[in-house]
Image (cartoon, rainbow, N blue to C red):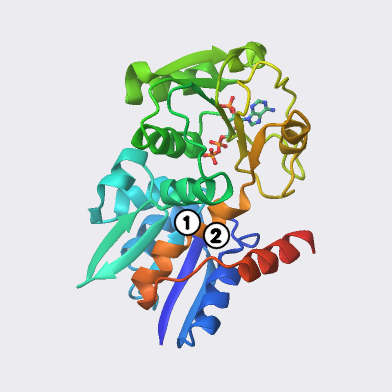
Amino acid sequence: MKRACVIGWPVAHSRSPLIHGYWLKRYDIEGEYVKEPVHPEEIDGFISDIAAHGYIGANVTVPHKEAAFRVAENIDATARNVGAVNTLWLQDGVLCATNTDIYGFLRNLDDQVPDWDTTSLPAAILGAGGAARAIIGALLDRGFNEIRLINRTRERAENLAAIFGDVLSIHDWQVRSSALRGCGLLVNTTTLGMKSSSPLEIELNALAPRAVVHDIIYAPLETQLLARAAQHGFRVADGLGMLLHQAVPGFEKWFGVRPEVTRELRNIVLADLNA
Ligand code: ATR
């Protein structure tokens, strides 16, 4: 039986087993997908010995995405650009790696707001962590040529600007509302607005008419940011689709079927998030 897992610390909250379990059943595949809590001190050994643990591949989540990047043998260009790995698979005994967050981000927006990529207008990103880095890469792939990066800790924004260059401009957290002036896309990658976190305080008036507002947070599904954006008449995209779509390439690599993100799957994960 083919076995895959999600590696994290902690990993109890991961919805990946629910997603892959749904597909295994739907496509009648004899396989298994489980959670593997791995302590940071043991992560390098675990990943390099993944076959000995009985797995043909894995997803990697917080805080191990950089460790996976360090340990994997054959890393594709997408993961190299992001500097982090979230999907591993064995090919002829070689541990291969990619990052499917960019794919998940783009597919989700394409699904929820088909003409979201108004690249003639600037985009604004809140946050400068790993998710922001992947999303900047995705926006550059789509042809955006002005991205405003707004982060509480300026140094982290500067680190990203050093990687991506002049297309990024850095704006202080205190001026986040005015930094949105004329932007056609706003993406929140901070943790503000999550169920157990503080709210995200920001004024949206300065965004361009018909701007798109996307929150990568999916618990709650409709964050305050998205609710306020909808009140303003902006187009909105929630974060759940990104989670579902980023799982597709991994499943295909491990189990040989390209799975479909269905309304039914979305409802199952949503019910679990609300439980
Ligand atoms: P990930 O790698 O998943 O993107 P992360 O590295 O923990 O996650 O980044 C979280 C983001 O949320 C960061 O940009 C963080 O800002 P700092 O770089 O200043 O830490 C942002 N964030 C978290 N709590 C915040 C708060 N109370 N106010 C403003 N930004 C916050």
Contact, CB < 8 Å: mark 2 with mark 1?
Answer: yes
As shown in the figure, which amino acid type bears the numbered disc 2? Leu
On residue 244, which mark appears? 2
On residue 220, which mark appears? none
In the rendering, at what x and y percent does residue 146 appear? 42, 20
As shown in the figure, which amino acid type bears the numbered disc 1? Gln
> Could you tell whether 126 is left or right of 78 in the image?
right
- Label 2: state its secondary structure: helix
Binning the other alpha carbons within 10 Å of mark 2 as few (below 14), some (14 to 19) or many (20 upward) gives many
Q: Is residue 252 above or below residue 63?
A: below
Q: In this view, does 72 lie above or below 105?
A: below
User: Is residue 16 or residue 233 the one in the foreground?
Assistant: 233
In the rendering, at what x and y percent does residue 105 appear? 49, 46
Residue in the image at 77% along x and 37% along y: 227
- Label 1: state its secondary structure: helix
Q: How many labels does the image show?
A: 2
Q: Quadrant of the N terminus?
A: bottom left
- Would residue 199 be seen by someone viewing this image from the given angle? no
Binning the other alpha carbons within 10 Å of mark 1 as few (below 14), some (14 to 19) or many (20 upward) gives many
Q: Quadrant of ligand 1?
A: top right
> In the rendered image, which quarter is residue 197 located in?
top right
Q: Mark 1 points at which residue?
A: 246
Q: In this view, does 241 lie above or below 173?
A: below
Residue in the image at 40% along x and 71% along y: 258
Residue in the image at 47% along x and 69% along y: 5
